[in-house]
Every structure is written in C-alpha cells, then in structure tokens.
Amino acid sequence: MSITKESDYQGILKAGEIVAFTLKEMKDHARPGMTTKQLDDYGASILQSYGARSAPNLTYGFPGWTCISVNHEFCHGIPSARKILKDGDLVNIDVSAEINGFFADNGNSFVIGNDIYNHQKLIDASKSILYSAIDAISHDIRISEIGHRMEKEAAQQGYKVIKNLAGHGIGKSLHESPHEVLNYYDPFTKQKFKNHSVIAVETFISTTSDYVVTARDKWTLLGDQGGFMAQHEHTILVTDRQPIILTKNNGV
C-alpha cells in the first residue's frame, strides 16, 4: 500500500496501534497453566472491542483469531484448549487484523515464566536483527540488502535464518507487494523499497533449521531440522529517512 492521503495514514496508524496493543496485552496476560485457546480468546476480546477482525481468519480461514506457536512450533500455531503453557516455554504470538479496511501485522517471541531452557539469547538476537533491519530501510534501498544484513547478523550470533518465510507488503490486504522481504540475500531480487509504502518486516531466526515444513494440521510450521525459532515483527511506513514504526507500542 502507498500512503498518499492523510486519511490513509490515520487508518493504517490506527490499525497498527490496535494490533500492537493486542499483542502486548496478550504477552503480559500469558502465564503457566493457561491454554493457548484461552490466550487467543483474550486477544479476540480485545480486537473485537475495537471492531477489528482477525486477518488470518478473514484472509485464509485460519482456525483462530491469532497465531500462537509453542517451542518447536515455529509459526502459524493453532490455538488449542489441549495445549497448556508451561514455565520456560518459548512462545510466539502473531497478531494481524483488519480495522476499517486497513491491515496491520506484528509478532513477538518470548519465554513464559522463567527462562529455564535458555531461550533468551535467541530472542535477543531476533529483536536486535529486526531493529537493525528497520534502521537500514529507506526509500530506494534494495530489499535484498536488508536480507543480506539480517542473514549476516544472524550468522555472527550463531544462528540461521528461515529461507521460505518472509516479511511482506501490507495495507489494504494482509499480503501485498512486495510479496517477499526475505531474511537472506537473494541476488535475483532487484526490487527496492518505495517511499510511502507499508511493509511488515519480520525476523525468522533459527537455531538449527533452514526451512519450515507444514505439520499434519496443515497450518503449523515446523523446522525441517528441528530446533527453535524466534520471530519478531513490526509494521512500518517507509520514508526517505527513518521508517515510521506503526506498531511501536507492542513491547518488542
């Protein structure tokens, strides 16, 4: 989406603020003993209070309001009444929603309770890589340059990037052009970021896997070589200077 009118900017800003607030509240609400369905229901109640609709459900028929993935589930986990959060779990919540015709997207990986399995180092690496990427984005920068930066910084910290997941354009629908903002360098990607465009930038930082595969439930994505993954995501507005982070209050 290209922001050309003040009304468009206010619409996408409101969408960003609502999904950011929902994500932060869900993260703060999560605790051991809670099911992921209960956590999803909590997020749904917040979104509904703003008149927002779940973007993955609206767009793809996803069976939940938000995606909640636990431990070896990398992303797109289905909320379940049978899945109980435990102390030390690595959890990813991805909240995307439509508000008055505008879409925004954000995600956060974090540890439930105490970090007894030492996931925090992975989480911190993912966050630092996200902000490094965002800081480097501006009008006329090649998308592949950002992927190269993310891949290089992940390797420097001892991690891999997932190569079949990507950030994306967003605005009037959940996925728009550019359809892939990769976490690695692709020499065939010549496309550049455009001024006034809205982008969902996200990390996919992995301990051992290079790709994701689809689980039997046909939604949840798992690492092809196992391990764990941290994902952090902001929706941003590209400018000719520093990007404007539309989901800045999500706690990431």
Image (cartoon, rainbow, N blue to C red):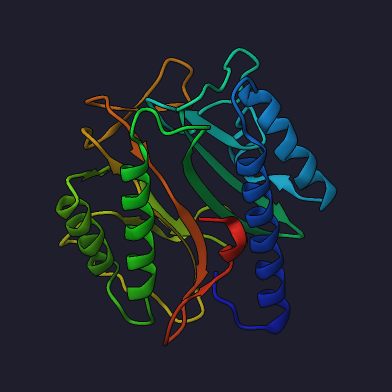
Question: From this viewpoint, which residue is outermost toward the top?
Answer: 82
Q: Quadrant of the N terminus?
A: bottom right
69 w.r.t. 163: above or below: above
- Looking at this view, is 239 or 116 the one in front? 116
Relative side of 25 to 226, left or right:
right
126 w.r.t. 164: above or below: below
Q: Position of residue 170 (x, y in %)?
A: 53, 60
Q: Position of residue 43 (x, y in %)?
A: 71, 39
215 w.r.t. 184: above or below: above
- Looking at this view, is 145 or 35 the one in front? 35
Q: Residue at x 23, y 69 (%)?
A: 145
Image quadrant in which you'd find residue 133: bottom left
Relative side of 248 to 111, left or right:
right
Image quadrant in which you'd find residue 211: top left
Q: Residue at x 65, y 68 (%)?
A: 12
Q: Position of residue 204 (x, y in %)?
A: 34, 46
Relative side of 74 to 69, left or right:
left
Q: Residue at x 51, y 28 (%)?
A: 77
Q: Residue at x 59, y 24 (%)?
A: 32
